[in-house]
Image (tube, coloured by chain):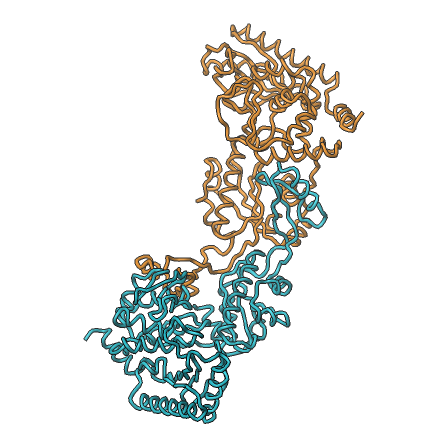
Chain colours: A cyan, B orange
Amino acid sequence: MNNIDSIRISILSRIKPHDPEKQKLSALAESLIRRINAIGRDMGLDIKAILVGSSARRTWLSGEHDLDIFIIFPPEASREYLEKNGLSVARKIAEEAQRSEERYAEHPYINAVFDGFEVDLVPAFGVASAAEIKSAVDRTPFHNEYVLSRIKGLEDDVLLLKQFLKGCGVYGSDLKTQGFSGYLVELLVINYGSFVHVLEASREWRPGMKIDIEKHATEVHNDPLVVVDPTDPARNVSAALSIDNLCIFMDKAREFLNAPDASYFSVRAVVPLEDSDFKNIMEARGTSLIAIEFTAPDVVEDVLFPQLHKMEDSVGEMLERYDFRVYNSGVWAEKKAILVYELESAALPALKKHAGPQVWMEEHAAAFKSRYSGSNAFSSVYIRNGKYMVEIPRKYATAKKLLEIELPKCGLGKHVALCIKKEYHVLENEQILEIREKKFREFLRKFFTK
Amino acid sequence: MNNIDSIRISILSRIKPHDPEKQKLSALAESLIRRINAIGRDMGLDIKAILVGSSARRTWLSGEHDLDIFIIFPPEASREYLEKNGLSVARKIAEEAQRSEERYAEHPYINAVFDGFEVDLVPAFGVASAAEIKSAVDRTPFHNEYVLSRIKGLEDDVLLLKQFLKGCGVYGSDLKTQGFSGYLVELLVINYGSFVHVLEASREWRPGMKIDIEKHATEVHNDPLVVVDPTDPARNVSAALSIDNLCIFMDKAREFLNAPDASYFSVRAVVPLEDSDFKNIMEARGTSLIAIEFTAPDVVEDVLFPQLHKMEDSVGEMLERYDFRVYNSGVWAEKKAILVYELESAALPALKKHAGPQVWMEEHAAAFKSRYSGSNAFSSVYIRNGKYMVEIPRKYATAKKLLEIELPKCGLGKHVALCIKKEYHVLENEQILEIREKKFREFLRKFFTK
């Protein structure tokens, strides 16, 4: 038995659900489905509940305890009918839950907790093929069917790849993580045949490469990895995967194959950064740290994080445009949203050089000279390399001042822009230690050590 | 009488030699020529002395008091014969000078002072045409002849243009000044017909433009201004003129034509920078100043300054290569040579980001990771935009340290390299005030105000 085989056995013993867990999950799923169907009959609705997702495919990681139960309506039902009656059935079920709340994706659904299992109760249209879907969730039953028809015997490999991706920190297709979805993992294992074969194949991957199991792609996708949905030729299953998360997986896969080790399947514990750590790190690095802190808008993470990343980019570009050189940046959010920028220096000289037209461009020359021969300039207008030059006061000599004045003019997403308009704070170096949230301090630790 | 005419009259009254000065110069020149010819006869040499340069053409500025007397040998004389006998004649003449010294251009000559006039006694070959010259100075008699044949009536305009160029700080074709030579000024006036016409014509000049009075150019010159020598079709008379000095003239010419004023003909007096001025300026600017100080090599300025400018460029490039951003630089030299660099900051963070190969380049990736997974790095190897990145200690976190260690590795001219090898000092900010030479302090004043 080689090293990978023994690692496989030891990891599976940890991540594969044991019989009591499986039985508990099956029993809960069956009872919920039975009750939904009964309620539907009582209400005179033509609905059918089905279990979908990893719990339906035996590809869930032990302890995950997530159930996706879809309440399927006839395709000819109207959206309003589905939303009203779907929610009403789901609410009745949720009455017996430990706790529950309404959530919103393309349409509303109920998230409820029964007996320690987190259950999503999702109304959907039972369309005839994935090409006819009326809302994004209608695809899920087709995914379920496709995977179930091919996954037999590969379930353990799916579990291993999921756990490996968790160890890399790139599992999850939500827009905060931008990693691999469970369905994507299943398709990769189906395509390559095993956990190890996926890893080996990734050594040859290049950004932009395409996997089309059913050879039926109809669209060109400009994504780091393209995995054509076997149930929908127009869709890229890995559209949410970022180039860096793809590369992190490729890098770790190669490392693991070169020197297999069980540690790749463990999530790295991060120690929150203490005040003294922060001071030592900043002193050693000699850089400046700037944080922008504001109340996060009350929207789901899939709406929030794309806006935060957009803000991260546009603020970074603005800093560079004003000559503040950005070494690193990052975003963090819970109740507060915080953007952090590490700068070469948060302070610049009071002056900046400003280049004018070529000396022989008479008209532009006259305009430039009349504009800059003022009294507040650091130099007279002079000539370098055939061009007029002048030294003028720098508009913002500190990054803090720049952000306090100009931040609202950056390109910002709708919800973030509204929050920024209300209030935000710019903190510099040790002022950042006023932010005491443990999760933020973990973020800061990762920010520095990577 | 328009404004320019009245300025012309007032400036000429100041710069045009009056009769006593002219008579004194003529008398001195005639007596020296007579005595050289007599000495030649006594020594049995076939030589003939002639007066060349601006004093021969009535285009010298009052008070300049320079005489160029050439001792012409037959073209068939050997170089050794000319050097030996030419110097021997010149030395005899110089015996009666107030002081004299031997100097070296392409061959040796004597510089002597008679009665307040500085006289160059230069041996040369009397070749039949400028195309047959045996040394660079042999050209001068042809220039003399050409100008004398066309300058009649334009002498005042030559004087005005020379004085105007002095006011701009761009008169002199030595390699320290890199400006306009006297001969170039004469040709421009001959070509355009008057002082004002030269200024007006310059409004249409563009870098690379060519003036070829005799329409006989045989070479392509890649210089800011090309004025083909009427006595030598292969030569650009304005080869020494820098792009910026050309542009300074064009700029001032335009300014003067738009608002004529006598002040353009005055050399701006520069007040040496006091210690307190320096401190105030540096505090207001918020930049860092670095000076490199060493003993200047004992060579003529035409050898020294090109080497200093080469050093200025290569040190500037090195500073930028190590992330020190250069705002301004300059060179100054008398006994000491001093290079000055104004930097955005003379200190940088302790770390720098170092980009590695793309993640999918397996072989390069392995090399990069094994090299940078060391313990002295500020971060682990991480991934950004599909590439490996790492933060490593910056080799030089201060410009002073960088220059103290790496300066000798810069591209340096021969004589400067030898001096730098011996000893040099790097001074930072107020340390530069240890340099107390008045002329250096004038240079510093101009360095800041431009």
User: Does B7 sit left or right of B154 as displayed?
Assistant: right
Q: Is residue B114 above or below residue A149?
A: above
Q: Is residue B71 above or below residue B317?
A: above
* Quadrant position of the N terminus of chain A in the picture: bottom left
* Quadrant position of the C terminus of chain A in the picture: bottom left
What percent of the width, then of the height, locates residue B408? 45, 44
Q: Is residue B388 visible?
A: no
User: Does B375 sit left or right of B270 as displayed?
Assistant: left
Q: Is residue A59 visible?
A: yes
Q: What is the number of callouts on the image?
A: 0
Q: Residue pushed farthest left? A: A1
> Which residue is pictured at 39% across the width and 64% down the height?
B381
- Classify residue A427 by image quadrant: bottom right
What percent of the width, then of the height, locates residue A353? 61, 49
Give the camera-side residue of B22 and B449: B449
What percent of the width, then of the height, locates residue A382? 64, 41
What percent of the width, then of the height, locates residue B274? 68, 46
- Classify residue A158 by image quadrant: bottom left
